[in-house]
Image (cartoon, grey):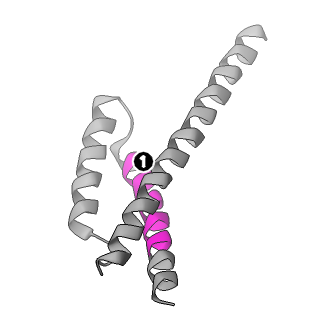
Amino acid sequence: MDELLSLRQSIDNVDAALIHMLAERFKFTQQVGRLKAKHGLPPSDPERERVQIERLRALAADSNLDPEFAEKFLNFIVAEVIHHHVRIRDSAAE
């Protein structure tokens, strides 16, 4: 039972680190969204997204993580980032 509790504590620690890293990532993407709005760039950059997915899939494979899962994870994050960029653009236009 101690081993189970220890493993769960490790999982909780990793989950906390993931949340902090995502928060940091979104701080940067908010800045990108403001720059895109300022310069009239579209909220989405399909070529950048393609390159990022390719890069993340390779990192996942190197880390023994399912690349398909990694791609789904990044697609979820990118969709949220694009949503934020659209909101930033629309609020800048008001």
Residue 20 against residue 51 in the figure, above or below: above
Left or right side of 90 for 64? left
Give the secondary structure at mark 1.
Answer: helix
Picture layout, residue 81 above or below residue 91:
above
Vertical order, 86 against 52 (above or below) = below
Q: Label 1 amino acid?
A: Phe
Q: Is residue 68 magenta?
A: no
Q: Is residue 42 above or below residue 75?
A: below
State the image coordinates of residue 12 (x, y, percent, origin top left): 67, 29
Q: Is residue 76 magenta?
A: yes
Q: Residue furthest top?
A: 2
At horizontal 42% and vertical 58% (from top left) the residue drawn is 29
The x and y percentages for residue 34 are: 41, 69
What residue span does the magenta drawing correspond to?
70-85
Look at 29% across and 53% down and name the residue there: 53
Say whether residue 43 is visible: no
Residue nearest the observer in this picture, 20 or 51: 20
Q: Nearer the viewer, residue 37 or 82?
A: 37
> Nearest the camera: 77 or 7?
77
Residue hosting label 1: 69
Number of labelled discs? 1
Relative image position of residue 60 (x, y in whole percent): 33, 37
Residue at the extreme right of the image, as rendered:
1
What residue lies at 77% left-to-right and 9% top-to-bottom? 2
At which x and y percent is residue 82?
A: 43, 70
Q: Which residue is painted at 46% across and 61% down in the image?
A: 30
Residue 3 seen in the figure: yes
Specify few, some or many for label 1: CA neighbours under 10 Å numbering under 14, 14-19, or 20 or more. Answer: few
Considering the image in quadrants, where does the N terminus appear?
A: top right
Q: Main secondary structure of the magenta part?
A: helix
